Amino acid sequence: MGQSQENNTSGNDTFPPLANLQRLAISESGFVFDPVSGHNFTVNETGLFILRLLQKNNRLEPLLDRLTTEYDSPRRELERDVLEFAGLLRDYVGE
Amino acid sequence: MSTKDNNNASEPKKKPWVKPSITPLRSGFLNKSGAARHMIWRDNIDGVPVSKLLEDFKSPLFVVSEHTLRQNSKRLRKAFSTRYPDIMFGWSYKTNYLSAVCNVLHQEGDLAEVVSQFEYEKARGLGVPGNCILFNGPNKTRAILERAVNEGAHIHIDHLDELYLLEDVAKNLGKVVDVAIRLNFDTGYTEQWSRFGFNVESGHAIDAAWRIAASDNLNLVGLHAHIGTFIMEPLAYKAQVKIMNNFMNEVETKTGCVIKYIDIGGGFASMNSLQGIYLPPEQVVPSIEQYAEAICDTLLELTHERETRECRRPTLILETGRAVVDDAEVLITSVVANKHLPDGRRAVVLDAGVNHLFTAFWYNHDVVPTRHLSGRPEETVLYGPLCMNIDVMRNSVMLPPVNVGDTLIFSPVGAYNNTQWLQFIEYRPNVVMVQENGKVSLIREAENLEIVTQQERLPEHLKNPYPKGTPRNFLTTPK
């Protein structure tokens, strides 16, 4: 795990490119619009929180640091769920 | 200490973590997943907490409610006995032959309806007298027929070969045996189950009746038919009763026999959702009372004239299985893993699969969590634990995110699972019964290696898996 974390922090492969994330229009209620693909999505409250953070910084480690301070859950559980969420983000807004 | 406490008190309280989700919005697609299940949860079975059941008996776990089972049986009995004067019920062993389930229903007054040597022996082993057994099925050997004749079971003949075999058995035993024949016919409502019994329309049934009438050792006293399974149209039974009544009159007139009972089998639907039917069972499954009305009113009217001839109305026998036991049992299963499929759907792996829940192949079982789930419901696939692609417990259900260790309840599962389940890849789990007094009894113990392998025999020369030494360690470079 240590090695994968190192890779994540040294590169930006975990999440879609920053430009892709920043182009997303996100409403307060969790409605997400991608103006390039034209696709719409909804995110839950946690997904909304993460997306807003990712629009500023798409690196995993700082995100996990912030989530650890915000949420009552072990870091490894947060990481597991964020990695799964990241996989979906790559599929939906990665290109 | 006080400083530390003050510091803790000043720290903002952390929020509970809910798995992040992102769901594509697709317009124009029907929601075939039904309503979201996050608003409904069930944390106990007849007052016994699910957490306590799992602590004592592990997951996955089948749980039978004795109370529901008895209530269902009583409701069925009341629905029919208030509409027809002479009713008997036979408990369909193949629907669920766990001993505890069978004896609850025998205590409620059911006969045993069996379809094989195994089921016959099981009923006898439970203490059911031979004359309380209805013996159906197409495979009755000479040995089991001899036992059934000697013990006074009610034998329902399925085909001509059985007729001749039974006649020979009766003759050798020096007995005259009262028998019934199984009929098949077209009601116009259901697919014809013509593989069982003698066909009415083609004349095979009356031929069989003639042959029995000519026998010195057989005496035709009953007619049996079973028109199908999960029949959601009560009028199908009305048609069945008419056809059987007409045949009864014909056979009595032509052969001089006296029919004492008509056994119309089972097939009533339960509150389960057949795959491919999108309306909920509450909207499409008739009540027991609707079935009873269609059957009893018809039979009462058609047999009225028998009384004027001083000929008794036939006893009406029902072999209702699914409608009695299905909603009396649930399956509790635990979440093993979460994943997302490449098409974006969420998938959950459970510790119970189609090897345990055979009816998942044809039902969309109701699935509810055992706690309130927060978060947005998503279309979710529920997989079992088997390393097989077929192991799908629900192809599509709306569920909020669940965590590893969360538990879900599948229902109704009482019919055809504890009989058709498989020991395949995994051990079969415990089955418990919550008694009416709230106590929980283990009614079938989970399997283990010893139980699963005890029937195997290993030839002497196969006792060592590697008699020439173990294969090389493939993680090292070959020399």
Image (cartoon, coloured by chain):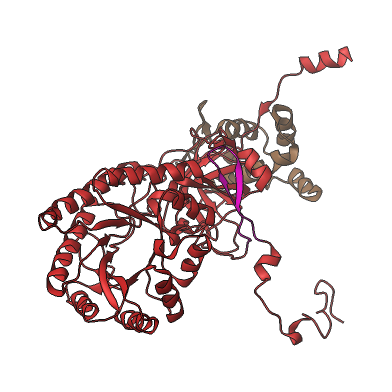
Chain colours: A brown, B red
> How far from the left and from the top, in percent, is residue B386?
59, 61
Residue occupying image coordinates x 61% and y 47%:
B441
Residue occupying image coordinates x 75% and y 85%:
B460
In the figure, B376 relative to A3: above or below? above
Residue occupying image coordinates x 13% and y 73%:
B254
In the figure, B260 relative to B29: above or below? below
Task: Tell me the quarter of the picture where residue B161 sits.
Answer: bottom left
Residue occupying image coordinates x 26% and y 48%:
B291
Q: State which region is magenta.
A: B426-447
Instruction: Tell whether position B244 is magenta.
Output: no
- Quadrant location of the C terminus of chain B? bottom right
Residue B78 vs residue A37: left or right?
left
Q: Is residue B65 visible?
A: yes
- Camera-nearest residue between B70 and B453: B70
> How far from the left and from the top, in percent, is residue B51?
64, 39
- Camera-nearest residue between B174 and B97: B174
> How far from the left and from the top, in percent, is residue B30?
36, 45
